[in-house]
Image (spheres, rainbow, N blue to C red):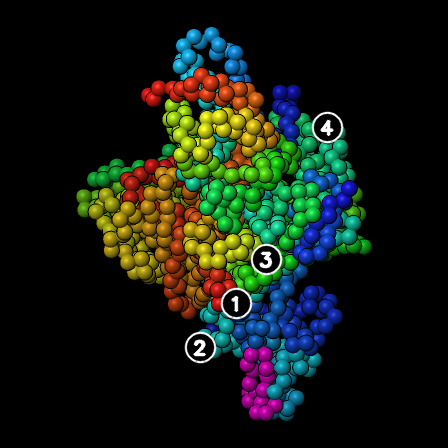
Amino acid sequence: MPTDFTLNGKPASFDGDPETPLLWVLRDHLGLTGTKYGCGIAQCGACTVHLEGKNRRSCVTPVGMVAGKKVTTIEGVEGAEAKAVQKAWVAIDVPQCGFCQSGQVMSAIGLLKAKKKPSDTDIDNAMAGNLCRCATYVRIRQAIHDAAAMVEG
Amino acid sequence: MNAITPTRRGLLKSTGLVLGVALPAAGRAARALPDAPFAPNAFVRVSPDNLVTIIIKHVEMGQGPATGLATIVADEMDADWSQVRVEFSPANDALYKNLYFGTMGTGGSSAIANSWEQMRGAGASARAMLAEAGAKRWGVAVGEVKVARGVVSHGDNKASFGELAGEAALLKPPEKPVLKTPDQFTLIGRDTPKIDSVAKSTGAAQFTMDVRRPGMVYSAILHPPLFGGKVGKVDVSAAMAVNGVLGVKPIPQGVAVYARDTWAAMQGRAALRVEWDLSKAEKRSTEELYAQFAEKTEEPGVQVEASGDAKAAFKGAAGKLEAVYCFPYLAHAPMETLDAVIEMQGDEVHVWMGSQFQVGEMGAIAAVLGVKPDKVVLHEQYAGGSFGRRVSPGMEFGVEAASVFKAWGGKVPVKHVWTRENDLMGGFYRPLVVHTVRGGLDGNGEIISWDHVVAAQSAFKGTPMEFMGIQKGIDGSITEGAAESSYRFPNHYVGQHIMEGGVPTLWWRSVGNTHTAYAMETFLDQMLERGKKDPVEGRLALMHDERMKAVLRKAAEIAKWGSKPPEGRARGVAAHFSFGTYVAQVAEVSKGPDGLPKVHKIWCAVDCGVAVNPNIIRAQMEGGIGYGLGHALYGEIVLGEGGIVQQSNFDTYRSLRIGEMPEVEVAIIESGAHPRGVGEPGLPPVAPAVANAWRNLTGKVVRRLPFSVGGRV
Amino acid sequence: MKAGLIALGGAALALAITASAQQEAGLRPVSAFASIADKDARSVALFEEMGKVLQHPRCLNCHPRTDRPNQGEAMTPHDPPVTRGPDGHGAPGLECAACHGPRNVAFAGGKSSMPGHPDWHLAPASMAWEGKSLAEICEQLKDPKRNGGRTLAQLTEHNAKDRLISWGWDPGAGRAPAPGSQAQFGELSRAWVASGAKCPAAK
């Protein structure tokens, strides 16, 4: 039986093993490659998507687990927080190699949705699961503060 | 890759206003595209829709060459930054070789350094032709025509680059295009926005792993559990039973699993049952290797550098210090694991990858597939990090990907992706290294002897690059930074031993400097303390290069060296020259809850010559610091009993996380010197600066890395 | 040549260590304590048997003394360095549920897994057991201020039936389960309470 869910606001379906991680359904079957593979064991956060609006590692999410639920990826993320985070990211040139950044951006948006004005500690706590081997962390922190200020207006 | 970059003494000299290097004409990339009426050389294309496309000959793996090279061209061309696009070049040495290497390649922090004049010439040449086209159109002297922000003008006459493209295309490129003087730069020296930030912040940037081809199958590979192991009998039954697995093929590198998606390939890989032939495999553990290497460093080895008589001076010294340093194997672990997509199109092999040595790697792929090198077409992709990992002298990954493709018949497109486990357990590590250093002081606390022996495997030994990397028995990358160091000692010896080992090793961000800077700067710090000298003043007195002294002074100045650090914190300093760039750093640390240094701030001064893009230079200092710090604190690949790698994923190969990233303040020394690299030089000073601060705080001397093993208090 | 041939499966290498951790003995049944004549001594002995569960990594890892849980058989700090957040379900932006789903999820190859439960969360700070002696944990368990406001009867019910506690015996691939079964643990709890809920002497 196919797994049906809502992907970036539109109906989506996967007709295969419901144990397949959402990550690979998105990337290999639905053609949304913005969500990245980095470790497969929820250590790096490169595969972060929003499940019902909250940060979730798609590499440890069997697609069967999202049946009937709302999944948002970097390709479909919207709203004031998303706009602000991406604007802030570009404004101070956060990315280096860029491979982890979809996950960083998604985590940052998830944080701002949950906490309007995060402190440095809030940022450390929320972003602790997103590795960046290029170590763009100084800028990630700054961009989140900048984005929070933008959302506040 | 210091071995293939020019030495400090052989640095290219800027030739002033006239272009010193020949510009290749537009190649296939430019000509093959439908809308390319003006392609004055291999690096620039102006289309009628007024876009300026700059062809990038280096792989973009995060260090910013796509932006930097485009900036140089666009500045000389007087293009408007908003009209600039970039495109990665095809694999073609005639057009796109690294001028330092003689072949296409990105490494040794050389992307901007080797291209500086070439890119300036490419831009200046295009500008001259566009100006000439404008002058002809309006019937005026070319000297009266102005070019600014993508517009050519004369009085009320104005035309965009795009409007003039067709006319410019009919002109002959100037033989010696006139370059700008630095005061005329409009983009160089400014924080020009990075060309790839939008794509990389929205998920739109395409990496190799994102490439999809019609009918493509996905492959995963299982490598032998020990280095030097070979495939024996393969039981494919469990792997074939995995839903979505299409087949299994043993190849020389291991066992490949082909599937309908990546997940099935990974599941099939895990289900393989293989009897490996490990009779010739490396079975020594890290502990055994350390012991054997350390013993070897008691012998002088091959002399790399010597002055005076270090041994005699040490014997008679009033004060002595001896130390053995152990540095573990380190994995590069770029966020995007190694990957490639290969497809046959007619008689051409098309390859999608973020290749770091484009021509060499495509040649290796051609050899595996039995086609002529010019039948391999590279579609260069953004690379999700490398740190040195995306090329090895034997082009082993390209060879493996081609073998996987070939074993599946060579007709169906194959995407070959490594798992993180493949990556961390797959070798090509920063070599395991042991240093033995002996230093002597006279009665006044002056250093009179420095005797330094390094034992390590060579990344070049037994590879096609051995002739470049090892000369007269010396692999310069083993002792770089200890030899030709920033200091002068009256009696000085540097020797090296190239050790035999079955673990493949490789250059790793800043190569030999990863360990030489640590040994030099921590040992020196202790020697200066024994000689009752200030760490900054003491270093300055021993330095022989004014630029090195200036960065050290600058770092000390911005860190307010000499002022009292906040309660519970201490500072340490280190300075190091690598890849033509001078860097000094001051670290401020306290004791973290886990007994390891909590690094609060790094002050960093850098002199890399002309600062093409200060924002990228700061970013590379931050990145080098973070990468260096993470590995200094936690990084090690350990060979356990019997030679089995103990780390397999990021749960066991700890990486720096955001809460551990210090604040970084960067000061860039203003310079008119030829620009040099920034991708690597930010890394070497950070670990010794932290170690020196840690010793000042706790008394703990750390000589075995990482700190989690040798530095906990 | 023969000696050089060894059979090894996919990702099995690094995981061999965790697999060997499944050495825990079971729990002794309540009947095994009937021979202890002294009621208080019997009560203490029953609690000490319960202690095999209470101090097992599956239980102790999420009753940390700090805001960061531990993980694994060696009970090392949880990596990534997560924190409890306002209600024990993690920090805003990195809740436990970012990784821990409603059930255990095997990684590729199935030799290890991401543990999961619908209500995966940390025990409140008041219920921290890490680093405490069994005597201290015992006193803590009896104190409603430090046991989630439970009476002893409720505590027994909790030990016997709570679904998150059940996870300890079904922890997913690559993790040793708590000793015995939850039913046995519940019976031991009931017998301990019935015998007066005595605690081991503080050392």
- Identify the residue position indicated by label 3 in the image: B59
In terms of sequence position, does the residue under pointer 2 or pointer 1 come before the other? 2
In terms of sequence position, does the residue under pointer 4 or pointer 2 come before the other? 2
Q: Measured from the top left, where is residue A133 in percent x and y?
A: 51, 49
Q: Is residue C153 toward the left or the right of residue B345 in the image?
A: left
Residue C49 visible in the shown view: no
Toward the right, the furthest residue is: B346
Label of residue B193 in the image: 1
In this rendering, the label closer to the viewer, 4 or 1: 1
Q: Nearer the viewer, residue B22 or B404?
A: B404
CA–CA distance between discs 3 and 1? 19 Å
At label 3, counting other C-alpha atoms closer than 10 Å, the crowd grade (few under 14, some 14-19, many 20 or more) is many
Q: Are the residues flagged by discs 4 and 1 from a single subunit?
A: yes
Q: Is residue A22 toward the left or the right of residue C146 in the image?
A: right
CA–CA distance between discs 4 and 2? 69 Å
- Identify the residue position indicated by label 4 in the image: B235
Q: Measured from the top left, where is residue B30 in percent x and y?
A: 69, 68
- Identify the residue position indicated by label 2 in the image: B183
